[in-house]
Amino acid sequence: MPGLSSFEATRQIKKARPETKVLFLTMYDDEDCLVECMEVGGSGYVLKDSPAQQLLLAIRDVYRGGSYLSPKMLSQLVDDFRTRIKSNHRQPRFATLTPREKEILKFLAEGQSVKEIAQHLNLSVKTIEAHKFNLMRKLDIHNKAQLVQYAIQKKIIKIPVGP
């Protein structure tokens, strides 16, 4: 596009009309371009060498409010993700919690204070504080609201429904 990059054009379009859906049709099959496309608000990314049916599918998906990613790009992202997982040998964060940390998470999410938990488990307040610190660090949680939200998402506690 002479004079204006597709990324800058998308920024301007989305600023003026945020509801507008933008589908990128590009020859670039690299992750950096895809990332920038998503950052500026693109709803889809189709490679120019894609079959016509893929382009039609992308247009339909984006028109309906969805998003679309060329299978070749999706495959690259999945391969990259697998490589990152293998190199980190990373366990899901919840799996790194000890049984005691899970127990304390439940009590905290239910609204009990550190002092109440200490009394209930017959432990010192300092011990409970240490467990609380460790579980929040492991889960990358920084306040009690996030802790409660996490506990609900993981079905550690349930929200009562109705009277």
Image: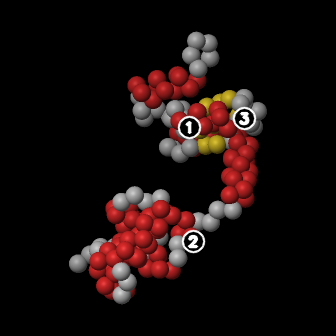
Give the mark nearest the N terminus, 2 or 1: 1
- Which residue is rendered at x = 72% and y = 35% of the image? 29
| Few, some or many residues within 10 Å of mark 2 (<14, 14–19, 20+) | few
Query: What kind of element bears circle 1?
Result: helix
State the CA–CA distance, disc 3 to disc 2. Answer: 36 Å
Task: Report if the CB atoms under discs 2 and 1 are less than 8 Å apart.
Answer: no
Which residue ends up furthest to the left in the rendered image?
Answer: 163
Callout 3 amino acid: Asp
Camera sees residue 158: no
Q: Secondary structure at mark 3?
A: loop
Could you tell whether 163 is left or right of 90 in the image?
A: left
Tell me which corner region of the image, top left, top right, bottom left or bottom right, holds residue 18: top left
Q: Which residue is mark 3?
A: 29
Amino acid beneath label 2? Ala
- The quadrant the N terminus occupies is top right
Count the numbered circles shown: 3
Disc 3 to disc 1, C-alpha distance: 14 Å
